[in-house]
Image (cartoon, coloured by chain):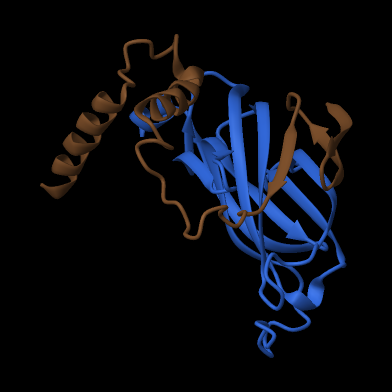
Amino acid sequence: MAEYVILTTEGDFKVRGKVGRVSVSFGIQEPPETEHDVEATPETFTHETFEDALDRVSRPIKGKYADVPYSSEDLIREKRTEAQLEDR
Amino acid sequence: MLYSGPKERGRFVKVTFAVACDFANRSDGGKLNVVGIFNELYSTEFPYVRPEIYVVVGYEATVAEEGQTKHIRVVLLKPDNPDPEIVSIEGVYTVRLPTYPGRPRYVNSIFHLPQVEFPEPGDYAFHVLIGGDDRERVPVHVYNPQDLRQE
């Protein structure tokens, strides 16, 4: 059982248990530099950003479920099918 | 005018939400991206080592709490184990000035836990404790699909 201390911007955090190298981060929403808040737009949240996030999510199941599709189009198609099945 | 009402005064930092998920990060401006929230996990092999879990917790501190230090603890428990603690992360957080005077300070934290080991199927939960008080609970039920098929 591991026991160690990690340093964060907010102070030291002690970790104990059967787990790898934990990281902790604290954050707040920053005021926008422009006059108005900026919503997520295609420029700030691109297809690549989404795919990258999906790739990271899919990483744990790759190998064991290598045949599972995980592109955004596949995910949307899968979710639509699930929703249709639930509606029945 | 202080934003904190009579019911809020004297309360410690409030936990506004807590989730376990596959991935989380912050975009520019500090907005949270949270992907793949779950309460159930499946594995045919035990102990099951989950490659990555992110626990995301949101807090709200009133203006009256500025400067106070809070003991924060996120712990993964399996209540029916002789030793229920699987993973524990604890530290101290100091409430800073809110972004806008008189308004609450909204803070979020991302706990990235790689290689979490679940010794057996069962009912687990992440508990978020502030100052020793259990403020939020994220249940994680771990199943063996083979067991489900036999039922």
Vertical relation: B15 (above or below) B40: below
In the visual, does B23 lie left or right of B91? left
The residue drawn where x is 79% and y is 78% is: B64
Quadrant showing the C terminus of chain B: top left
Q: What residue lies at 71% left-to-right and 74% top-to-bottom?
A: B101
Chain B shade: blue
In the rendered structure, the answer to whether residue B150 lies left or right of residue B9 reads: left
Note whether A58 is above or below B84 in the view shown: above
- Is residue B116 or residue A33 the one in the foreground? A33
Q: Which residue is drawn at the image coordinates 35% and 28% (left, top)?
A: A47
Residue B68 pos. (x, y %): 87, 67
Q: Chain A is drawn in which colour?
A: brown
- Work out which residue is located at the far left of the displayed protein and give it: A88
User: Which picture quadrant has residue B71?
Assistant: bottom right
Residue B28 seen from this side:
yes
Residue sitting at 47 percent across and 59 percent down?
Answer: A36
Front residue of B33/B151: it is B33
Q: In this view, does B66 lie to the left or right of A80?
A: right
Is residue B44 something that shows in the picture? no
Q: In which quarter of the image is residue B84?
A: top right
Horizontal and vertical percent position of residue A18: 75, 27
Quarter of the image where one finds residue B46 = top right
Please tell me how many numbered marks the rendered image carries.
0
On screen, residue A46 above or below A86: above
Q: Is residue A52 above or below residue A17?
A: above
Q: Where is residue A46 in the image (x, y as percent from the top left)?
A: 38, 31
Q: Position of residue B129 (x, y in %)?
A: 74, 58
